[in-house]
Amino acid sequence: MVTFSEARQFVAAELAPGWPPRLGTFHVSPTGYEDDRAWCVVVGAREWLVDGDHDYTIMDAPSILVDKATGQVEHLSVIEHLDRLGAMWDQPVSS
Protein backbone atom coordinates (compact mmCIF):
# COMPACT_ATOMS: atom_id res chain seq x y z
CA MET A 1 0.00 0.00 0.00
CA VAL A 2 1.17 3.50 -0.87
CA THR A 3 1.60 5.73 2.19
CA PHE A 4 0.48 9.35 2.29
CA SER A 5 4.11 10.45 2.38
CA GLU A 6 4.84 8.42 -0.77
CA ALA A 7 1.72 9.84 -2.44
CA ARG A 8 3.02 13.36 -1.79
CA GLN A 9 6.34 12.41 -3.39
CA PHE A 10 4.63 10.92 -6.47
CA VAL A 11 2.59 14.09 -6.95
CA ALA A 12 5.61 16.36 -6.54
CA ALA A 13 7.59 14.29 -9.06
CA GLU A 14 4.77 14.53 -11.59
CA LEU A 15 3.72 18.16 -11.17
CA ALA A 16 6.71 20.19 -9.98
CA PRO A 17 8.77 20.00 -13.21
CA GLY A 18 5.96 21.54 -15.27
CA TRP A 19 4.74 24.06 -12.70
CA PRO A 20 4.69 27.52 -14.33
CA PRO A 21 6.51 30.15 -12.22
CA ARG A 22 3.67 32.63 -12.90
CA LEU A 23 1.47 30.47 -10.63
CA GLY A 24 3.79 30.95 -7.65
CA THR A 25 6.13 28.61 -5.83
CA PHE A 26 5.11 24.96 -6.20
CA HIS A 27 4.12 23.45 -2.84
CA VAL A 28 2.79 20.08 -1.65
CA SER A 29 0.89 20.47 1.60
CA PRO A 30 1.85 18.19 4.50
CA THR A 31 -1.89 17.69 5.06
CA GLY A 32 -4.44 16.04 2.80
CA TYR A 33 -7.46 13.75 2.79
CA GLU A 34 -8.32 10.13 2.16
CA ASP A 35 -10.95 7.54 1.49
CA ASP A 36 -10.56 3.77 1.35
CA ARG A 37 -9.14 3.89 -2.21
CA ALA A 38 -7.03 7.04 -2.50
CA TRP A 39 -5.12 9.89 -0.93
CA CYS A 40 -6.12 13.44 -1.86
CA VAL A 41 -2.88 15.44 -2.02
CA VAL A 42 -3.18 19.22 -1.77
CA VAL A 43 -0.90 21.14 -4.12
CA GLY A 44 -0.67 24.72 -5.23
CA ALA A 45 1.28 27.89 -4.76
CA ARG A 46 3.12 28.20 -1.46
CA GLU A 47 2.07 31.85 -1.48
CA TRP A 48 -1.57 30.69 -1.15
CA LEU A 49 -1.33 27.44 0.84
CA VAL A 50 1.18 28.69 3.43
CA ASP A 51 1.04 32.47 3.31
CA GLY A 52 -2.68 32.88 2.54
CA ASP A 53 -2.21 35.24 -0.44
CA HIS A 54 -5.49 34.96 -2.37
CA ASP A 55 -3.81 36.29 -5.51
CA TYR A 56 -2.35 32.78 -5.94
CA THR A 57 -5.62 30.85 -5.64
CA ILE A 58 -6.40 28.69 -8.68
CA MET A 59 -10.17 28.57 -8.79
CA ASP A 60 -10.58 25.69 -11.25
CA ALA A 61 -7.72 23.52 -10.04
CA PRO A 62 -8.42 19.78 -10.06
CA SER A 63 -8.13 17.66 -6.95
CA ILE A 64 -5.11 15.37 -7.10
CA LEU A 65 -5.70 11.78 -5.96
CA VAL A 66 -3.19 8.97 -5.60
CA ASP A 67 -4.46 5.40 -5.68
CA LYS A 68 -3.46 3.64 -2.46
CA ALA A 69 -2.93 0.29 -4.20
CA THR A 70 -1.09 1.35 -7.37
CA GLY A 71 0.30 4.84 -6.75
CA GLN A 72 -1.37 6.11 -9.92
CA VAL A 73 -1.90 9.89 -9.86
CA GLU A 74 -5.31 11.10 -11.02
CA HIS A 75 -6.66 14.61 -11.57
CA LEU A 76 -10.36 14.97 -10.72
CA SER A 77 -12.72 17.81 -11.46
CA VAL A 78 -14.07 19.00 -8.11
CA ILE A 79 -17.51 19.75 -9.54
CA GLU A 80 -17.84 16.36 -11.23
CA HIS A 81 -16.69 14.44 -8.12
CA LEU A 82 -18.02 16.62 -5.31
CA ASP A 83 -19.71 13.76 -3.42
CA ARG A 84 -16.55 11.66 -3.23
CA LEU A 85 -14.25 14.59 -2.51
CA GLY A 86 -16.64 16.02 0.07
CA ALA A 87 -16.60 12.70 1.93
CA MET A 88 -12.78 12.69 1.79
CA TRP A 89 -12.62 16.17 3.33
CA ASP A 90 -14.14 14.63 6.46
CA GLN A 91 -11.04 12.39 6.77
CA PRO A 92 -7.95 14.64 7.05
CA VAL A 93 -4.43 13.16 7.19
CA SER A 94 -0.95 14.60 7.66
CA SER A 95 2.57 13.42 7.14
Image (cartoon, rainbow, N blue to C red):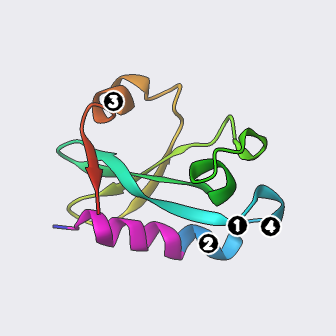
Q: Residue at x 63, y 42 (%)?
A: 61
Marker disc for residue 94: none
Pointer 3 or 1: first along the chain: 1
Q: Residue 26: where, in percent of width, then height?
A: 64, 65
The CA span between labels 3 and 1 is 26 Å
Q: Residue at x 29, y 28 (%)?
A: 87
Q: Amino acid at mark 1?
A: Trp
Residue 51 horizontal side relative to residue 54, left or right: left
Residue beneath label 3, please?
Answer: 84
- Circles 1 and 4 in contact, beta carbons < 8 Å: yes
**Picture quarter with the N terminus:** bottom left
Residue beneath label 4, please?
Answer: 21
Q: Residue at x 28, y 62 (%)?
A: 4
Q: Residue at x 36, y 49 (%)?
A: 32
The CA span between labels 2 and 3 is 26 Å
Magenta stretch: includes residue 89: no
